[in-house]
Amino acid sequence: FFRFVFMSKEQPKTSGKASETEKSRKDGDASDEITRLPLVDADAAFILGRGGKTKDKIARVSGAKLGLPHGSLTLKIEGTPEQRRRALKYCKCVMAQRVGPVRIDESSDDGDLTIVDVPQECAGFVTGTSGSFLRHVEDEHRTIMFFTGYQGKDHVKDNDVVEKLAIFGADRGRIGSKVKVLAAIESKLPGHGTKDMEDHESESEGLATDTLRLPMEEISWALGKNGATKRKLARASECIVEYVGSVVFMCGTKKQRRAAKEYLQWIMQRLGGPVDLNYAGRDDVSLISIPQEAVGYVTGVKRSTLSRIEDDWGVFMLFMDQKTEGKRDDDEQLIIFGPRRARRGAELKIMSTIEGKCPGCVTKDLEDTISDDDWGTDVYRFKEHEQSYALGKEGTTKRKIARAAACIIEYVGDYALFAGNRAERGRGRRYLDWLLRQRSGTIYLDDIQMEDHADVHRIPLPSDTLSEVVGVKGSGLRAIEEETHTFLFMVRDKTGNG
């Protein structure tokens, strides 16, 4: 039995607090130091959190590794000196919440702190029921936040009007969390932060924030149902996009901010019908021709099919009314915006959808191909009855192979298309080959050629454990695959043994 680990899955990072430091024997290298923090029962429960979520959050934000074995009252912290220092700071804040308000002064800021003033009447709204809103923002932007008595240089001791919200984390995460909090404040107190705000476009090439005010009557269109359009803009542009009242905040690099603004403008133009735009010279564009008879099928009822593809791949798509060289008169032009990988995934899905409506339209010129390019697309033609087996129930097998290989895989007619870099495509083809071999018979150890592949692990299984590990109809293996993003199957050695 083999477990194939196709994606190098990053392990959760953790952090801890320093009461006692163990130096590594490796010449005192600071990066190998370990910090141990003795805890009392109540503190251990707070640090751990429900299901270990607080410990994992501190680890994620600090970059340190936290260890708190079951029943132990000693927190073990590993990482660089900076990671351990930040983890210790966050642990102190968590433990302080148990007995009273969190106190933070200017010395607490070593490049990872942003303070937001929250009107006292909004503090409960920003917190949410049992802290639900703050936890949601922390999860979205990989930060950790506390209401605190901030002792900074401008601190007013008897200020009963404003609460201080401390946001810890990386620069981008803190900016995203801050604008999310500002949006919550604005919804509670309209105009509080935006009544005198003007449009702003930063000249910085790096991380910065641009603002753009929209007419209030257009906000619902720009937001989309349940915020779907806003999320689509953010994913396609790789920019943080948040609406604070009627002001759009766009946070990211200059390229990301510009893309978000342009995508937003095109969405607003779409209120009047198809969009005519000049995409020449852009590196965030893919264009695909849709036969007229397939347009409705590709679009779906109330744009449902396109919206689902946009959500799946994090792209932004528009039909154009611009005449394009080489297009047939009965073709519609669909333009796809977003990062290269996301665009290609969406494009292949559109091709599959077209082929489903108009068989042969996309595949008439396809043939088995292995691209010589580092980034490209390989093609494999399925043999009889292979495709349904490779697809699985509701596409689960295809998605499993794609996820394990970290490769874009789409089935277009009788063809499997593999998109990505050379290594990703190689894994995708190989995993599909191994999958299809299972259909026709037993796979033997020599077929795998483990010595040639660094992405394969072999786990011998005693015969008396097979039923427990494999589960009913393979359900045990499928559950492990789903959780670990791997591809597992049984093989035999040359003797025919498992």
Image (cartoon, rainbow, N blue to C red):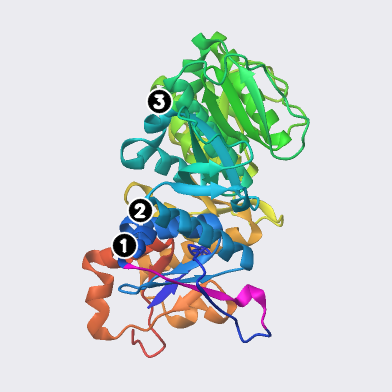
- Could you tell me which secondary element the residue under label 3 belongs to? helix
Sort mark 1 into few (<14), some (14-19) or many (20+) by Cα contacts within 10 Å.
few
* Residue at mark 3: 121
Taking depth in this image into account, of 331 and 426 the one nearest to the observer is 426
Q: CA distance from mark 2 to mark 1?
A: 8 Å
Q: Residue flagged by tag 2: what amino acid is it?
A: Arg
Q: Is residue 379 above or below residue 330?
A: below
Q: Is residue 32 magenta?
A: yes
The picture places residue 95, in percent across and down from the top left corner, at: 41, 57
Q: Is residue 302 magenta?
A: no
Q: Tell which circle, 2 or 1, labels the residue nearer the N-terminal end.
A: 1
Residue 174, horizontal then vertical, whole percent: 57, 42
Q: Is residue 432 visible?
A: yes
In the rendering, which numbered label is found on residue 98?
A: 2
Query: Do callouts 2 and 1 mark residues in contact (Cβ within 8 Å)?
Result: yes
Of label 1 and label 3, which has the lower sequence position?
1
Mark 3 is on which residue type?
Glu
Label 2 environment density (alpha carbons within 10 Å; few <14, some 14–19, many ≥20):
few
The structure residue drawn at horizontal position 67% and vertical position 35%, both measured from the top left corner, is 256
Q: Could you tell whether 328 is left or right of 66 in the image?
A: right
Give the residues drawn in magenta, as a range: 28-40
| Residue sitting at x 60%, y 42% | 152
The kind of secondary structure element at disc 2 is helix
Label 1 sits on residue: 42
Residue in the picture at 24% in, 69% down: 471
Residue appearing at x 48%, y 82% in the figure: 446
Comes first in the chain, label 3 or label 2: 2
Q: CA distance from mark 1 to mark 3?
A: 31 Å
**Alpha-carbon distance for marks 3 and 2?**
23 Å
